[in-house]
C-alpha cells in the first residue's frame, strides 16, 4: 500500500518573514500541535533555496518535510549560481524536485540533465521528485505516450534501482493555467508511467509513488486521488494558501 504524498511547490514565492505565519495557520487548520504528525499522508513543501533552513525549522515540529526545487548533479566546482547535494544535506534537506517543466522550459534542463540529477540524488540518499509531462501541442498531436516514454527512459537508463524515486506527472498545459487534466486523463497517464517502470523493474513499480500536478486544487483533488495509480499531488498555486492546501491534505487523509 503506497502512502499518499502531498507536496506543495512554492516556486519563486514567499519571503522568509512570511513562513512562520504560513506554517502556524496550516498546522492550525489541520488541528496539529507541535510534536504531533499526520500518520497516513506525507506532507512536503518545496521552497526556494534561501527559505530552506528557516522553513525546515518551522515545519519539522509538525512532521512536514522541506524539499529543494532543484539541485546540480556535480558535487562541487565552477557552476555559478548552482547548489550541490552536499550543500542540501549539510542543512538536513533530503528531498528535491528535479526537472520541473519550468526548469526545462526556462532554464535549459534536458532529459539528460534531469536523468543525471535523479541518478546522483538516489546514490546520495536524496529523494528526487522527478517531473515529467507533455506540452499542449504534444497532447493534441497524439504524442503524449512518446514524450512520457522518452522522459522516463532517459531517467531509467541511468538507474539500476528506482527505490526512493518519486515521479510527478505534470502535463505542461495544466500547470498554472486552471486547466486540470480530467481524472481519467491523469489516471491513464499514471497507469502508462507505472507500466514503463514495471517493464524495467518489475514489481518495484508498485512501490513507487506517482504524483499528479497541474492546477490541482481543493475542488478537484478528491477525484484525482480516487484513481488507483495517483498517489498524491504536486501543488503549485493552491499550496500558497494554508487553508486551500490543508483542505487538499484532508482529501488525501
Ligand atoms: P499549479 O503548479 O498547481 O500552480 O498548476 C503545479 C506545479 O507546477 O508543480
Image (cartoon, grey):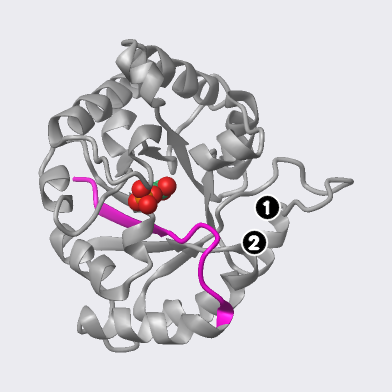
Q: Position of residue 84 (x, y in %)?
A: 72, 52
* Residue 171 appearing in the image: no
111 displayed left or right of 212? right
Q: Residue at x 66, y 33 (%)?
A: 108
Residue of label 1: 85
Q: Is residue 42 above or below residue 75?
A: below
Q: Residue at x 45, y 33 (%)?
A: 162
Residue of label 2: 89
Residue nearest the viewer, comparing 115 with 81? 81
Q: Quadrant of residue 73?
A: top right
Q: Is residue 233 above or below residue 53?
A: above
Queried whether the magenta region covers residue 69, the answer comes back as: no
Marks 2 and 1, how far apart at CA: 6 Å
State the extent of the magenta-drawn residues as a range: 1-16
Q: Position of residue 153 (x, y in %)?
A: 48, 18
46 displayed left or right of 226? right
Q: Secondary structure at mark 2?
A: helix
Q: Position of residue 44 (x, y in %)?
A: 40, 62
Q: Residue at x 10, y 44 (%)?
A: 226
Amino acid at each position: 500500500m503506497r502512502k499518499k504524498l502531498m507536496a506543495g511547490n512554492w516556486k519563486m514565492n514567499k519571503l522568509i518573514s512570511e513562513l512562520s505565519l504560513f506554517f502556524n495557520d496550516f498546522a492550525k487548520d489541520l488541528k496539529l500541535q507541535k510534536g504531533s504528525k499526520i500518520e497516513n499522508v506525507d506532507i512536503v513543501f518545496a521552497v526556494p533555496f534561501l527559505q530552506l533552513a528557516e522553513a525546515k525549522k518551522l515545519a519539522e515540529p509538525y512532521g512536514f518535510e522541506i524539499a529543494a526545487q532543484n539541485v546540480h548533479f556535480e558535487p562541487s566546482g565552477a557552476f555559478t549560481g548552482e547548489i550541490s547535494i552536499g550543500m542540501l544535506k549539510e542543512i538536513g534537506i533530503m528531498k528535491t524536485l528535479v526537472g520541473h517543466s519550468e526548469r526545462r522550459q526556462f532554464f535549459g534542463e534536458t532529459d539528460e540533465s534531469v536523468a543525471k540529477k535523479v541518478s546522483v540524488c538516489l546514490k546520495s540518499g536524496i529523494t528526487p521528485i522527478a517531473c515529467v509531462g507533455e506540452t499542449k501541442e504534444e497532447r493534441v498531436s497524439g504524442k503524449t505516450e512518446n514524450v512520457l516514454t522518452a522522459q522516463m527512459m532517459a531517467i531509467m537508463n541511468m538507474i539500476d534501482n528506482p527505490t526512493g524515486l518519486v515521479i510527478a506527472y505534470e502535463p505542461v498545459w495544466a500547470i498554472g493555467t486552471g486547466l486540470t487534466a480530467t481524472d481519467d486523463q491523469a489516471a491513464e497517464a499514471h497507469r502508462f508511467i507505472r507500466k514503463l517502470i514495471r517493464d524495467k523493474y518489475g514489481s518495484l513499480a508498485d512501490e513507487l509513488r506517482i504524483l499528479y500536478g497541474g492546477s490541482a486544487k481543493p475542488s478537484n483533488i478528491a477525484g484525482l486521488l480516487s484513481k488507483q495509480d495517483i498517489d498524491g499531488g504536486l501543488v503549485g498555486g493552491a499550496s500558497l494558501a494554508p487553508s486551500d492546501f490543508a483542505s487538499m491534505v484532508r482529501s488525501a487523509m
